[in-house]
Image (spheres, helix red, strand yellow):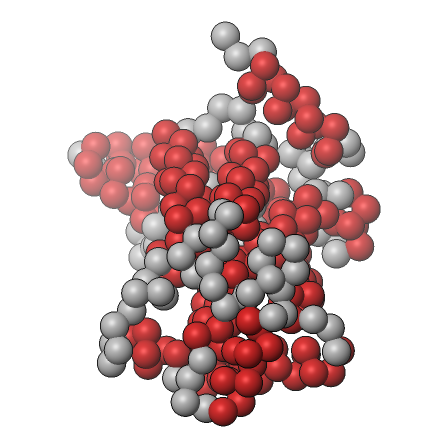
Amino acid sequence: MWYCRRVGQGLQRPLRERLLLPPGWGSRAGAAAAASSLPSASPGGLYEALAESAPVHWAESGLVALQAGTGLPWWLSIVCAGAALRTGLTLPLAAHQGHLLAKLENLQPEIENLVKRLRYEVSIHGKQLGWSEKVARFHFRKNLGRIVSELYVRDNCHPFKASLLMWIQIPVWVFVSIALRNCSVGAADSEVLAVQEQLSIGGTLWFTDLTVADTTWILPVSLGLLNLLIVELFALRKLELSRFQKYATNVIRGLSILMIPIAATVPSSMALYWLTSSFMGLSHNLLLRSPTFRRLCHIPRTKSDSDTPYRDIVSAFYTKYFLKK
């Protein structure tokens, strides 16, 4: 094969093991760190500059326009805004991510075959040229990186493209969160002050005032449990995780728990938005497991795909937590 004959050419790094996590979860985990600084950011610092940035003002205007245009109470407008953003913006990106990851998975058998042939050819070539084991290993890794890169180009599925969801969802999550906080705490702008007054009576049930934190902790705890559920559901896709996957999963579990006290210190409007965003994220991630929806999105079928994904979730959950020795 022509791939394996180009032993001496310059290359990139080989394919690395990918962590199997729900699309978009990395964005919530990354944004959690940013969120922790929102309530306590000092004046004149990074938070103030971000709070006065154009994207945040656009988010404020969008929220006000949505509430004024629909006439809905503010709590329902926030829920609708979170649902609309996750459905209209991040769901298509998540489907695109699923398409790329399916292509990458389908490439693995071809890559494994090329690895075997390349290792054999490097071994033969090394013996002819008198290479040491270290030199042979260097040429093997170089050429493997080139081969894998060429396969990515051929199938248009470079792993970096799968991170597009994260790079868009994190900023949107942060901008809308800060916009809601600006509206909740008020500002010199008379329009924002008017919104603050509306938010103070725009809640429902136990959180009637959206400008203050939820002292019952119902919203924060619900958010934490929902994020933990997302992590556990998608950890079930592999009952046997690698060491790196176990470490990353535990880190995200920790971030999910950390979000509880954070959500308990921010205005209820923010906690409600976060809860809505997480709920929609879970719904969309489950939807992306549906064989029918995957066909509609033209996501290639892979060896790991199942015709009964939801039954498999229940079965894996029972096996992991009830049949554990």
* Quarter where residue 202 is shown: bottom right
> Would residue 264 be seen by someone viewing this image from the given angle?
yes
At 21% from the left and 40% from the top, the residue drawn is 135
User: In this picture, is 48 found above or below 298?
Assistant: below
User: In this picture, is 51 found above or below 188?
Assistant: above
> Would residue 81 be seen by someone viewing this image from the given angle?
no
At 34% from the left and 37% from the top, the residue drawn is 122
At 59% from the left and 35% from the top, the residue drawn is 233
Residue 105 image position (x, y, % from top left): 58, 42
Residue 258 image position (x, y, % from top left): 38, 46
User: In this picture, is 255 found above or below 207?
Assistant: above
User: In this picture, is 164 found above or below 14?
Assistant: below
* Quarter where residue 308 is shown: top right
Left or right of residue 148, residue 219 in this image: right
Residue 15 versus residue 113: which sits nearer the camera?
15
Residue 150 image position (x, y, % from top left): 48, 56
Count of all numbered marks drawn on residues in the image: 0
Residue 198 versus residue 301: which sits nearer the camera?
198
Residue 325 image position (x, y, % from top left): 50, 8
At 61% from the left and 24% from the top, the residue drawn is 317
> In the orientation shown, which residue stands out farthest toward the top?
325
Left or right of residue 16, residue 135 in this image: left
